[in-house]
């Protein structure tokens, strides 16, 4: 057992004696460990990546408010086994806060959810579960009284991403604008810019609300019990105010693509309508109770928005000389851009079918 990890875990109000601490999972952002004790509970120790989440106080404020609100909702509904249906974070012994810093990093501890499983499978069945879980998560937080902030400011702001692309084109820092393919991609993307910035315009006009969203809707960010029932949504670092399009569109950007986002075989890229239909069915079953007609109407827009936004981000980074995303070869970001542009067009071709399916669910 690592002595430093033991010292850090001991700063929190853990019940029982620590027996062992071992690495847990393979997350890309935070370092995670399982803390085994001789008490009733085991725990999860995480090092918060404060290079990405720079305001740890705000991060934990958001999580504490959201989990407390969900816990209250579950109790009022007469739910049992609540500790397996919402995460519980442990306060630091000295400060009472749900994080602690040793000067070299920020740490937190939550109760380990017993007999729970995550899955990596992306098929219609699990896409339906995802839609249902994330829709329910948003519904539970639709009336939260606390003010939450953006843990990553402008995370899904399309207007900002468009400005960043224009800045990259103007600066041409890596001298790549002369490439014919770069010019062709730019000519393909720009005609849709105004349409894809619709959400920000509707928000300014007072027509589109911001909700408390998860903003990282992956199939492995929810937990199941042994019988396959959904227990809770996890990985709450990106929990923040956003448009519901964030949770809806971001899931489909990866789940509904027929290939990986950096697959160079652009001709194989397509938009899987069976995944869209399954996810949308589950999502609306849970979320329709609070969604406005305008939000429902624009769910197909969300399915198009996120591949477009990601194409713009990959493309701007390529033009800038690959300064943000890690690349494995010189044209990696360009390949990613081609892929996401193809997915965007595939999604747009399916908009009539998406609208028809959503209309069928309200019958």
Image (cartoon, rainbow, N blue to C red):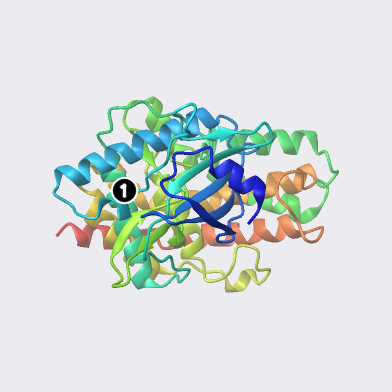
- Looking at this view, is 283 or 16 the one in front? 16
Asked if 95 appears above or below 73 in the picture, the reply is above
Residue at x 59%, y 41% (from the top left corner): 8
Q: Quadrant of residue 26?
A: bottom right
136 displayed left or right of 246: left
Asked if 63 appears above or below 46 in the picture, the reply is above
301 displayed left or right of 128: right
Residue at x 34%, y 41% (from the top left corner): 67
Residue 328, x across and y down, in percent: 77, 61
Which residue position holds label 1?
Answer: 137
Picture mark count: 1
Residue at x 63%, y 68% (from the top left corner): 266
Residue 232, x across and y down, in percent: 34, 55
| Quarter placement of the N terminus | bottom right
Asked if 352 appears above or below 76 in the picture, the reply is below
Residue at x 18%, y 52% (from the top left corner): 79
The answer to whether any part of residue 355 appears in the image is no
Element marked by disc 1: helix
The answer to whether any part of residue 238 appears in the image is yes
Residue 88, x across and y down, in percent: 37, 44
Q: Quadrant of residue 91?
A: top left
Residue 145, x across and y down, in percent: 28, 28
Question: Which residue is most to the right?
Answer: 175
């Amino acid at each position: 057992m690592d002595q430093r990890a033991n010292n850090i875990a001991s700063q929190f109000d853990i019940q029982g004696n620590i027996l062992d601490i071992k690495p847990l999972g393979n997350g890309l952002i935070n370092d995670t460990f399982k803390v085994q004790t001789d008490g009733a509970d085991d725990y999860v120790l995480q090092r918060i990546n404060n290079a990405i989440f720079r305001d740890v106080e705000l991060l934990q404020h958001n999580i504490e408010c959201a989990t407390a609100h969900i816990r209250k909702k579950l109790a009022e509904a007469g739910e049992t086994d609540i500790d397996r249906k919402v995460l519980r974070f442990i306060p630091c012994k000295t400060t009472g806060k749900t994080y602690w810093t040793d000067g070299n990093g920020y740490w937190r501890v939550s109760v380990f959810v017993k007999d729970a499983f995550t899955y990596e499978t992306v098929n219609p069945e699990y896409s339906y579960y995802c839609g249902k879980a994330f829709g329910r998560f948003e519904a539970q937080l639709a009336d939260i009284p606390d003010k939450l902030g953006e843990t990553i400011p402008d995370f899904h702001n399309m207007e900002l991403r468009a400005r960043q692309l224009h800045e990259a084109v103007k600066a041409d820092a890596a001298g790549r604008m002369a490439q014919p393919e770069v010019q062709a991609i730019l000519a393909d993307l720009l005609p849709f810019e105004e349409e894809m910035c619709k959400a920000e315009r509707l928000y300014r006009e007072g027509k589109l609300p911001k909700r408390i969203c998860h903003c990282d809707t992956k199939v492995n960010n929810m937990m199941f019990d042994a019988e396959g029932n959904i227990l809770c949504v996890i990985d709450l670092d990106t929990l923040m105010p956003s448009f519901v399009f964030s949770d809806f569109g971001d899931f489909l950007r990866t789940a509904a693509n027929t290939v990986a986002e950096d697959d160079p075989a652009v001709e194989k890229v397509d938009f899987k309508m069976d995944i869209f239909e399954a996810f949308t069915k589950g999502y609306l079953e849970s979320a329709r109770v609070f969604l406005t007609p305008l939000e429902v109407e624009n769910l197909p827009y969300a399915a198009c928005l996120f591949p477009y936004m990601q194409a713009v981000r990959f493309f701007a980074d390529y033009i800038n000389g690959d300064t943000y995303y890690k690349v494995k070869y010189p044209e990696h970001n360009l390949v990613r851009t081609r892929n996401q542009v193809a997915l965007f067009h595939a999604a747009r071709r399916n908009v009539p079918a998406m609208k028809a399916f959503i209309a069928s669910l309200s019958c």
